[in-house]
Image: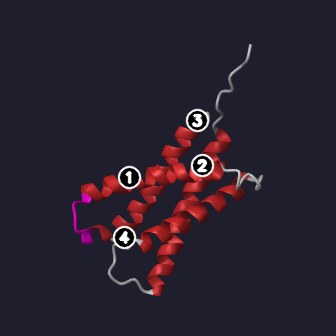
Amino acid sequence: MNLGIRFFISWILTALVMFTLFYYWHGVILNDFKRLNFPLTVFIVFASITYLILGAGMYFLFESSLLKYFHNFFVRGLITGVIGGISLFMIVTVINISLTKDLNPTHLLIDCSWQIAEQTIGAIILVLLKVFIRDKVPVED
């Protein structure tokens, strides 16, 4: 598998955008970080690694044969974002990583909607970079 510059730039920028949205939502808007039971630095490092893994996973999902059926890049990106958002929401909910004590249906719906929006924005960044960045194709002599 040839992973070119397109992969690395798309992966890092997608992860960075999603992490920034995550940080803004939980750290600024909801101010959830004050409820952490461990150092903020540890949380940020683990969250960064999680978003790097998520960004790579979304890139490979976007490129998968499962989604190659959708020829329109933007539709494929939207599907990738929705799958990424729902998947992350389910994992976080099942292993009970939440920054709030009250997990009522309204909170779960808002959290799921936010995860889908966050990952869909990340997927759109991935699509835009995929469209505008070209890998050099080796010339055979």
Q: Which residue is mark 3?
A: 3
Q: Secondary structure at mark 4?
A: loop
Are discs 1 and 3 less than 8 Å apart at CB? Answer: no
* Three-letter residue code for mark 1: Ser
Residue 97 circle label: 4
In the picture provided, is 109 more to the left or to the right than 136?
left
Q: Quadrant of the C terminus?
A: top right
Task: Say whether disc 3 or disc 4 marks the residue closer to the N-terminus.
Answer: 3
Q: Is residue 6 above or below residue 37?
A: above
Q: Which residue is mark 2?
A: 60
x 32%, y 81%: residue = 101
Q: Which residues are magenta?
A: 34-40
Q: Secondary structure at mark 2?
A: helix
Distance, label 2 to label 1, CA atoms, is: 19 Å
Task: Say whether disc 1 or disc 4 marks the residue closer to the N-terminus.
Answer: 1
Which quadrant of the structure image shows residue 42?
Answer: bottom left
Distance, label 3 to label 4, CA atoms, is: 33 Å
Task: Say whether disc 2 or disc 1 marks the residue closer to the N-terminus.
Answer: 1
* Three-letter residue code for mark 4: Ile
The one of 9 and 54 positioned closer to us in this rendering: 54
Distance, label 2 to label 4, CA atoms, is: 25 Å
**Residue 94: horizontal and vertical position, in percent?**
44, 73
Q: Secondary structure at mark 1?
A: helix
Task: Say whether disc 1 or disc 3 marks the residue closer to the N-terminus.
Answer: 3
In the picture provided, is 53 more to the left or to the right than 58?
left
Distance, label 3 to label 2, CA atoms, is: 11 Å
**Front: mark 2 or 1:** 2
Answer few, some or many: residues within 10 Å of disc 3's Cα (few below 14, many 20 plus, some between 14 and 19). few
The one of 3 and 15 positioned closer to us in this rendering: 3
**Residue 27: horizontal and vertical position, in percent?**
34, 65
Residue 48 circle label: 1
x 64%, y 52%: residue = 62
